[in-house]
Image: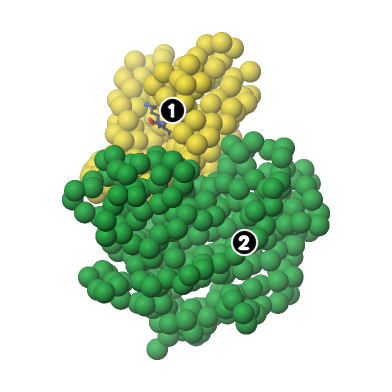
Chain colours: A green, B yellow
Amino acid sequence: MAGANGECQNGAVLDQWHPLGAIDEAEPNVVHVTRLLGESISFAVTPEGRSAVWRTRGDLAAGMPVDPESVAGTLPSRCEFLYVWTSLGDPPERSFDIPEFFEPDRRNFNACTIGLRTSAPRAVENFLDMGHFPFVHDGLLGSEPRTEVVDYNVHVDGDTNEVWATECQFWQPAASATATEGQMVDYVYRIMQPYSILLYKSCPAAPERMDLIGLFVQATSEEHCRGHMFLSLIDDESSIGHIRRFVQTIFAQDVPIIENQNPKRLPLDPQAETPIRSDRASILYRRWLSDLGVTYAVIPAA
Amino acid sequence: MIKLYDYVLSVNCYKQRLMMSILDVEYETVPVDFFPGWEHKGEEFRKINPLGHIPVIDDDGYILWDAHAILVYLAAKYDPSGRWYPTGDPGLLGETASWMLFAEGTTNTASAARLCVNLGYDFDLEACQAGAHRLFRVLDEHLWFREREGREWVCSGAHPTIADIALFPDVVLSEEGGISRLDYPALRRWTDRVKRIPGFEGMPGIFPASRGVEV
Ligand SMILES: N[C@@H](CCC(=O)N[C@@H](CS)C(=O)NCC(=O)O)C(=O)O
Ligand SMILES: [Fe+2]
């Protein structure tokens, strides 16, 4: 039975697709071990980018050579959007779409994978919150006193059941690795699954298109996670190293903020934390998690 | 001009940026795609440092690696007052060397824990954390006694030394490795003092002292 012996008993979470690591960064035909939902999980990829994922077992220890296609007793897995994904339950046929990913002039790569001592939904919610830009990313993604979050729209998409926040705008001194001056930046946020979020952001190199920045969070336990930072950019100027440095600088500024939030699990009770996070997108995110029946890594509403 | 082979999230690289910022030394950084690119392990980088780690400096063709060795060099060369690396005072110099060695310990415990938690390094996290607490306890007590003597820094002189610079990043980012400083009040007061050194520069994850937030 799915999750029968595991720490997580929450069907809504077990049935999701969860990221384990970047395909490119996993040496092929070698056992890699990580954690998911409180369990030790192993995976391997072929040189062609096919994957096998299984619950860690003694005969296949970390670092051992393995032919992924010969492993028996595997979990569902897929290689998609740069990462290896698995599920500990009965996952849907499709995860989510990112049509832009396949545009030929985009550069798609993992900016970093960073471990965080907080719950996966806390990490998602921080990513969703524009209000912290001027205080935490002063000089880059915001600057005092231009702290105003312009009114924006939120809704749950009827077809995909994804949370969207649209028409978000924010004034940013250095919106991207290529920015040379401050600008008003358009944002769209999209939460595809409980622990995965994408943001679309005006692209300096192609004004009519958007850059995509994703945070795909791997809940290693209820109060720990790994954030995989997905990039799909239109930028043929900057080196990957330069872009990574920009993104990692920003991510590292968030780390102490995210880790100092208590409780670490995200409270879903609407009354729980109103004054600081009265932001509409996070209210909708929390309600949507409740409606999906997510109880793992959150404090469910009474 | 000095070139620093650098990675933004590296405490050992930050030690050099901090020192050069305080000494007002001009330098340029050569960013190394440390994570997840592992550029420092590549063939090209090993031509610069065969050990495959950063920081490395290139000062007009003079190449030096090892964070604490670079601090010695920078202070000896670029601090005309001779206070950051006090070669003129054998007693103080000995203390400085001793605390620099101690800082190797905090790097290998506190900062190693941070690499485990944040970058997924495969070290024994609990051992790193326990080791860091042992060293923090020693340093906290030491600094508490220094304060009783009316001193503010790790060594007994009136001025900070490279030992403060070597220790500060390992200490101030310890929370990221799951090492709380709640029980080390003297250590917390000292990190605030370091943040107020003229020319102080932070790194992502460190708040300036003026915010009044101690993390
Ligand atoms: N002993 C060296 C160690 C420096 C070190 O560990 N640097 C890290 C980055 S913070 C590194 O390059 N690690 C790669 C490795 O050692 O494999 C020093 O003090 O500079
Ligand atoms: Fe942030």
The image quarter containing residue A172 is bottom right
The reply to whether dot 1 and dot 2 touch (C-beta < 8 Å) is no
Total tally of numbered discs in the picture: 2
Q: Residue furthest bottom?
A: A302
Chain letter of mark 2 equals: A
Tell me the quadrant of the picture where the N terminus of chain A can be found: bottom left
Q: Residue furthest left?
A: A58
Residue A253, how many percent across, how many down? 54, 51
Residue behind mark 1? B41
The amino acid type of the residue labelled 2 equals Ile
Residue behind mark 2? A98
Residue A221, how many percent across, how many down? 34, 64
Q: Residue at x 29, y 34 (%)?
A: B105
Mark 1 vs ligand 1: CB below 8 Å = yes
The image quarter containing residue B138 is top left
Left or right side of B6 for B41: left
Tell me the quadrant of the picture where the C terminus of chain A can be found: bottom left
The amino acid type of the residue labelled 1 equals Lys
Asked if one can make out residue A289 in the rendered structure from this viewpoint, the answer is: yes
Q: Nearer the viewer, residue A192 or B105?
A: A192
Left or right side of A6 for B23: right
Instruction: Reply above or below: A96 against B124.
Output: below
